[in-house]
Amino acid sequence: MHISERHIKNSRAPLAIIGAGALGCLFAVLFSPACPVLVYDIDPAKQEILANEGIYCGSIHYRPQVCSGLAQAATAGLLLIMVKSPHTAGLARDLAPCLQPGAKVLSLQNGLGNLEDLADFLPRKSLFGGVTYQAAREVLPGQIQHNGSGPTYFGAAFPGQSQGEAEIAGLFKSAGIAAIVPENIEEERWRKLVVNAAINPVAAVYRKENGLLPQLPAARSDMEALTKESVLVAQALGLALSWETMWERVLAVCAATAANRASMLADVEARRLTEIEAITGSIVRLGEKHGLEVPVSRRFLRHLEK
Ligand code: KPL
């Protein structure tokens, strides 16, 4: 196999990826033709592997500039937050003293609560939030499979409090990564939350790739019920999501990411903390708040929470 090498000399990097899991490494590779990329991961063993070996993704080998501390990563103009949601608050606390004036922070994490955790420590005007339909699997540290390529949606985390979406969109565009600034980012966040709430816990319990889940009758019926429950919660919040469209989208994402093992399954298999609280926990809490029955979400939450 021909491996194409991407080495780019660094000046002041426009972009730092914080969290070098499957999606963090994927975005480093995707941005690499357009700009130098700094990568930071809290795990020193991961830092060493990335610094020595770089990132392998299909036929691409990319050596990012690996940061040994957050302060170095925080010199970039845009920080892409790709850590798992249980680690967001700790990261925000550590980032607060080193964030540069004018720096932008874009969270593309799963689940609810990450933006609030970031805002507890970082200026609201620096914060952007979004969702991505890119899918990747970490085969070994720094070795990833790109298992699905969908758009990324983002916008100001707290509407009216930050500006600069066009600059961020320009960076995505220069790298050829599909990125959209929708009119209603809250609705897009919920569409992805519904997809995650339907696929991730089911994948983690049945331990199958996304493409196989709709083919297993029990898994399919759980996914259907989870989609219904989370759409009901979204509707109670006044969001214009419909059950039919969201079920179609869940099936479409399973097909588009057929070879992927969902991130929650990967976390369960690696015995890491999962995002069950930020995903299913949010549906259960908000369902309760609005007096809705969400029994299937509650069952998966009980099964997967620590
Ligand atoms: O976002 C994902 C994840 O694994 O976290 C999906 C969309 C389910 C793709 O695997």
Image: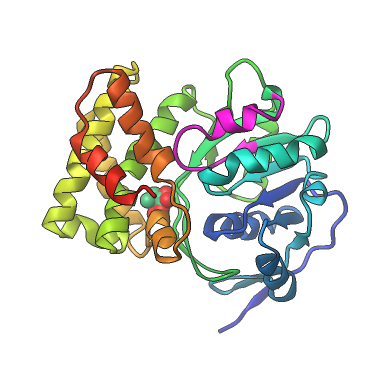
Q: Is residue 125 above or below residue 279?
A: above
| Residue 114 visible within the image | yes
Q: Position of residue 189 (x, y in %)?
A: 44, 32
> Residue 235 is drawn in which quadrant?
top left
Q: Is residue 152 in view?
A: no
Question: The magenta stretch spans which residues?
Answer: 106-123
Q: Residue 210, how many percent across, how many down?
A: 31, 58
Q: How many marks?
A: 0
Quadrant location of residue 230? top left
Write the residue at 18% across / 54% down.
219
Between 221 and 60, the residue placed more toward the observer is 221
Outermost residue on the bottom side: it is 1
Q: Residue furthest right?
A: 11
Q: Nearer the viewer, residue 294 or 218?
A: 294
Q: Residue at x 58, y 21 (%)?
A: 158
Residue 129 located left or right of residue 95: left
Please state if 101 lies on the left or on the right of 187 as rendered.
right
Residue at 25 percent of width and 39 percent of height:
297
Which one is nearer the viewer's eye here, 89 or 158? 89
The furthest residue to the left: 217
Figure quadrant of residue 266: bottom left
Work out which quarter of the rendered image holds the N terminus and state it: bottom right
Say if the magenta span includes residue 124. Answer: no
33 on left or right of 241: right
User: Does the magenta-highlighted stretch encompass residue 120?
Assistant: yes
Percent coordinates x, y for residue 151 in the rendering: 47, 44
Above or below: residue 288 compared with residue 76? above
Q: How is the image coloured?
A: rainbow
Residue drawn at (60%, 50%), measured in percent from left and top? Answer: 176
